[in-house]
Image (cartoon, rainbow, N blue to C red):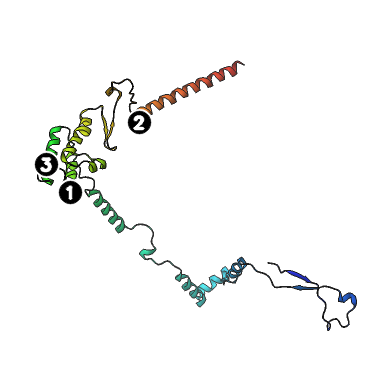
Amino acid sequence: MSSLIRVHCSKPLSQWSVGLSAAERGVRSIHTSSANRDFMSWFKRKKQEEHREPVKDTKQLIHDIEEGKAEVSSQASSNSKNRLELIPENFIGEGPRRYKRQRQLKQAVYNAPFNQWLSRGKIVSENELDDVISQATQKTLGREELDIPFPGLVAKFQFTKLLQEKSGYLIPDYKLTTLTTPLQFKEYFEKSILPSMNNPKLAFKEAEPNAIHPFSETYASPNVYVVNDITPREQKNKYDTIMKEIQRLDDEAIKKAFETARSV
């Protein structure tokens, strides 16, 4: 930053004014102050003050290497300090041992029976439902009565888990909370799950709890209108048909425009 120039209109000292004329005494004196450096100039000065190794001439450097001077060896030793050590912490990536370990862990997690506790075969009849309810009641509660409430949450949890495992169906959390007897669980299966398995028109989706989609044929009242579900495949086919029709109309319009332009 450039120096600030300050102009002062001050009266000369008496000892300096001896021998000066009146014109010389009236001249204004000019004073300069030190440079006012800002904060960023400190970094610039610091960078300039950093020691820089002088660049040697190539011929002189080759001559020094051939003679084996101490300066060259000391420079090589200083450069060796900046080399990266070949230790595991300085490597990026996965080695063969780590990759093998991760593959073993992945295989172990895949084989763990986290989500394989449900039966692959699902019940489809009331006789199979009766057998599953009877087995779950006898094993967890030790009795055959179905209309007696569960003695506690532990017994209810054991019963519902065994019921879902044997039947092959997951029960929604709402039903697990509100139903209090084995008989209520049996009625839930008879009303909500088994009809959807035996009647193709009742589209039951396991991904959506209680997702039973009715059709218009199931309602005889004239004031009830049910919009049937449209599958993604039907939507795609309809979309492709519409786009083809639009393309055909565009081609016809372009063709007519060319014919009109040629006739003119």
Q: In this view, does 238 lie to the left or right of 43?
A: left
Residue found at x 82% / y 81%? 13
**Secondary structure of residue under mark 2:** helix
**Secondary structure of residue under mark 1:** loop
- Residue of label 3: 135
Could you tell which of marks 1 and 2 lies nearer the N-terminus?
Answer: 1
Q: Nearer the viewer, residue 260 or 11?
A: 11
- Residue of label 2: 232
Residues at circles 1 and 2 in contact by the CB criterion of under 8 Å: no
Residue 9 vs 193, above or below: the answer is: below
Mark 2 residue type: Pro
**Secondary structure of residue under mark 3:** helix
Residues at circles 3 and 1 in contact by the CB criterion of under 8 Å: no
**Front of the two marks 1 and 2:** 1
Measuring from the top left, give residue 72's x and y in whole percent: 51, 74
Q: Nearer the viewer, residue 54 or 120?
A: 120
Residue found at x 20% / y 29%? 198
- Residue of label 1: 152
Which corner quadrant of the image does residue 183 belong to? top left
Q: How crowded is mark 1: few (under 14 residues within 10 Å), some or many (20 or more)?
A: few
Q: Gap in Å between the C-alphas at discs 3 and 1?
A: 19 Å
Q: Gap in Å between the C-alphas at discs 3 and 2?
A: 41 Å
Q: Gap in Å between the C-alphas at discs 1 and 2?
A: 45 Å
